Image: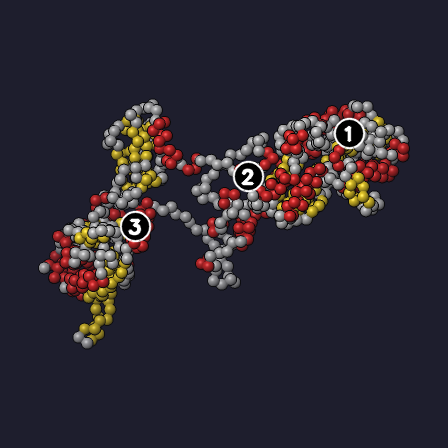
């Protein structure tokens, strides 16, 4: 009995998976537990195993194509089995769109419809080719108009003379000074990766749904710097400022549970655990591994774990459970010299802390200007959960902890 | 200018050339005593006598052969076919001898002969009497093919044809013989072979049409003008050598082209000029060239079918709408 192999849910936010690689081809024999494909999800590249053995009768998706959750990727069954019924149910959706052919009636010569051998025109609307009449191409070239900016009004979107004549560039495209013209260089279209799609979707959702507000405090880091120096003298693992910020946040979150919450529409969930996600920049985008129970871990544990998770993230080897369950997020751009910035809340968190660089600044102490070390942090909060005063209270606690690191021990 | 019927213009041309050059003579079925099946040779027998206006039996291959031989020997025959549908019987003389003799004999002689007569359909005459042969003869090296649409062109071009040192196929239409038109009264009025004429100026589309199809194109153009579409009509007049320069210049101006051709679609004037246009004016085309031709079907006898079969103004308008993106 043939079985459909459907796209499994490999992470809790996954909506579709891209077939990164097929390990089998049609006709191959597989046994239970064999890894037949690697699937790129929003978070990692995962392996797909089969439960039942058999012969791969049909592969329905090509490498590089996306399949929605539950979408059929392949059919496995007994060799020679008739699977036409099974495939019929799947319908044309899994078939590549390129195979659809369409007649183009308007192109045909009216007087010759019946008797001329007609040329089969394969329509590939997504092959990136811009259809334009030769004249329109030449006119566009002469005028320095890029065809991809022009909307074609001819059959199948063909760009024709009138489209070029009627073309009005957007304000942004207009050169500032008419006198000087620059040769325009070809733009490059990059296929959006699964990760970027997820970043785009989740962060847009967050920014457009959660009413964000921002509060910034400037923290005196002199004691933290001194404490870190002392710690690193005795610790075999190097403690970073980020580790100290994570620890301070964990302690502060314990004291301000509203900041450690999630909006659940009808309820606000005050999380029991303090799980801090740390944003890690990788080549293709951004990942947020989670340090669970951060409030219960010491700096050495936090440091070790952060380093390990960041490494996995860069290699895209993070497992879903290492990315799930965050209650708060920290994004640190201090190492890039960013003084301060605002971050977008990482759902379903209520807040995110944007950490800037430690700067050498003149400060006033006892009426005198002296050199100081300051670090700005900005808390983005979801106003549905956290109000301005609550956010301020959290930030004050955080500041006190960082300005007096010994207090974290309490 | 004088207003003449098409047949009168042809008659004047033959008359003038016979008067000018005594080597010119005409022969064919009924050309002498009956004044021609379509009265093209009216009065010529009286003027030039039986020696130069010769009635032949119904034997196209025979009299075409006599013509080719006479031409090889220095005379300038005009061979009239009652229709080019009958000239297929003489095709061996036209295609194998007239067109090739100069080439095969290394230029030792030439064949200055005109084969003329009506071409293509003329109403319900059935499949064997309705064929347009201009594209077929134009296929052969060594033959010029002329297919005029108006009396003045007919006169000027027939005179050129008679003076040509090489064989010329000169095509007319039963349906156009009575058609009147202004003809230049200029003395010795001549139109050179191989020159197209812009018969209507316009900016929006170029329509190419010769012979009877010119009149279809003209009807279509006047209707299109009511919709604000100005067609430029080019009558090639000479099918071969084709005046592609005039056509390309026009297409570069209008950016769109429709060819109307009373031939079957495969390998005709429409396909040849369509090819040349895409090669010579590729960057100026705003739409694929369209054509209106006969279908790839023999002429039907039935009136309703015949009307469907023959290109008409409506089809031309549809094709123009296609190339101007108006449908």
Please state if A175 lies on the left or on the right of B267 as rendered.
Answer: left
Q: Quadrant of residue B91?
A: top right
Q: Is residue A278 above or below residue A67?
A: below
In this rendered view, identify the residue nearer to me: A132 or A178. Answer: A132
Tell me the residue that label 1 is attached to: B81
First in sequence, mark 3 or 2: give its number: 2
Q: Are the residues at dot 3 and dot 2 in contact (C-beta closer than 8 Å)? A: no
Residue that badge 3 annotates: A202
Q: What is the C-alpha distance between the residues marked 1 and 2?
A: 40 Å
* Chain hosting mark 3: A
Q: Is residue B45 above or below residue B326?
A: above
Give the vertical position of A373 relative to A256 (above or below).
below
Q: Secondary structure at mark 3?
A: helix
Give the alpha-carbon distance from disc 3 to disc 2, as whole Å. 45 Å
Q: Which mark is in front, 1 or 2?
A: 2
- Residue identifier under label 2: A107
The image shows residue B280 at horizontal and vertical percentages of 62, 44
Same chain assignment for discs 1 and 3: no
The reply to whether label 3 and label 2 mark residues of one chain is yes
Measuring from the top left, give residue A224's x and y in whole percent. Answer: 17, 62
Question: What residue do we see at 43% from left, 37% from top?
Answer: A98
Asked which quadrant contains residue A39, the reply is top left
Tell me what residue is drawn at x 69 percent, y 27 percent.
Answer: B126
Q: Quadrant of residue A261?
A: bottom left
């Amino acid at each position: 009995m043939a079985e459909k192999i459907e796209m499994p849910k490999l992470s809790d936010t996954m909506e579709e998976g891209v077939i990164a690689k097929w390990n089998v081809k049609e006709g191959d024999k597989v046994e239970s537990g064999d890894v037949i494909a690697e699937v790129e999800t929003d978070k990692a590249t995962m392996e797909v195993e089969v439960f039942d053995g058999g012969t791969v009768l049909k592969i329905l998706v090509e490498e590089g194509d996306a399949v929605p959750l539950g979408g059929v990727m392949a059919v496995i069954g007994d060799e020679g089995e008739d699977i036409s019924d099974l495939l019929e149910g799947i319908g044309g959706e899994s078939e590549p769109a390129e195979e659809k052919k369409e007649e183009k009636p308007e192109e045909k010569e009216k007087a010759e419809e019946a008797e001329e051998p007609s040329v089969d025109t394969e329509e590939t609307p997504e092959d990136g080719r811009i259809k334009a009449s030769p004249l329109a191409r030449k006119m566009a070239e002469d005028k320095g108009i890029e065809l991809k900016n022009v909307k074609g009004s001819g059959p199948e979107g063909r760009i024709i003379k009138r489209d070029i004549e009627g073309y009005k560039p957007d304000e942004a495209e207009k050169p500032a000074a008419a006198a000087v013209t620059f040769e325009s260089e070809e733009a490059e279209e990059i296929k959006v990766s699964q990760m970027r799609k997820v970043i785009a979707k989740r962060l847009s959702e967050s920014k457009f749904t959660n009413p964000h507000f921002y509060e910034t405090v400037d923290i005196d880091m002199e004691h933290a710097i001194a404490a870190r120096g002392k710690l690193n003298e005795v610790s075999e693992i190097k403690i970073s400022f980020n580790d100290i910020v994570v620890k301070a946040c964990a302690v502060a979150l314990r004291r301000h549970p509203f900041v450690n919450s999630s909006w659940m529409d009808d309820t606000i969930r005050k999380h029991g655990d303090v799980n801090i996600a740390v944003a890690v920049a990788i080549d293709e985008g951004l990942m947020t591994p989670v340090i669970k129970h951060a409030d219960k871990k010491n700096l050495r544990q936090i440091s070790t774990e952060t380093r390990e998770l960041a490494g996995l993230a860069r290699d895209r080897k993070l497992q879903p459970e290492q990315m799930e369950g965050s209650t708060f997020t920290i994004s640190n751009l201090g190492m890039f010299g960013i003084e301060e910035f605002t971050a977008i809340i990482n759902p379903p968190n209520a807040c995110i802390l944007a950490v800037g660089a430690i700067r050498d600044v003149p400060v006033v102490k006892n009426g005198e200007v002296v050199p100081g070390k300051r670090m700005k942090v900005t808390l983005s909060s979801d106003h549905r959960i956290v109000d301005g005063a609550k956010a301020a209270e959290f930030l004050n606690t955080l500041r006190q902890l960082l300005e007096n690191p010994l207090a974290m021990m309490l | 200018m004088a207003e003449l019927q098409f047949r009168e213009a042809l008659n004047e041309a033959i008359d003038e050339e016979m008067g000018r050059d005594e080597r010119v003579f005409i022969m064919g079925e009924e050309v002498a005593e009956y004044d021609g099946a379509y009265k093209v040779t009216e009065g010529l027998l009286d003027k030039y006598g039986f020696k130069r206006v010769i009635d032949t039996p119904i034997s196209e291959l025979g009299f075409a052969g006599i013509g080719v031989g006479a031409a090889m020997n220095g005379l300038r025959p005009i061979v009239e076919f009652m229709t080019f549908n009958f000239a297929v019987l003489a095709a061996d003389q036209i295609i194998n001898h007239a067109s090739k003799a100069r080439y095969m004999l290394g230029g030792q002689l030439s064949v200055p002969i005109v084969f003329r007569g009506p071409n293509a359909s003329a109403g319900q005459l059935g499949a064997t009497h309705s064929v347009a042969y201009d594209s077929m003869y134009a296929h052969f090296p060594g033959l010029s093919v002329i297919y005029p649409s108006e009396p003045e062109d007919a006169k000027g071009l027939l005179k050129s044809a008679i003076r040509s040192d090489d064989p010329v196929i000169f095509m007319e239409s039963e349906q156009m013989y009575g058609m009147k038109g202004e003809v230049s009264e200029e003395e010795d009025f001549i139109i050179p072979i191989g020159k197209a004429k812009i018969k209507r100026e316009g900016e929006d589309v170029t329509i190419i049409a010769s012979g009877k199809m010119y009149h279809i194109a003209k009807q279509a153009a006047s209707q299109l003008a009511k919709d604000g579409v100005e067609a430029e009509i080019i009558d090639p007049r000479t099918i071969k050598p084709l005046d592609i320069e005039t056509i390309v210049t026009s297409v570069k101006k209008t950016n769109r082209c429709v060819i109307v051709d009373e031939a079957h679609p495969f390998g005709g004037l429409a396909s040849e000029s369509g090819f040349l246009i895409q090669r010579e004016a590729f960057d100026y085309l705003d739409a694929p060239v369209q054509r209106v031709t006969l279908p790839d079907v023999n002429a039907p006898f039935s009136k309703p079918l015949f009307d469907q079969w023959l290109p008409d103004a409506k089809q031309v308008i549809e094709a123009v709408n296609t190339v101007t993106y108006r449908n």
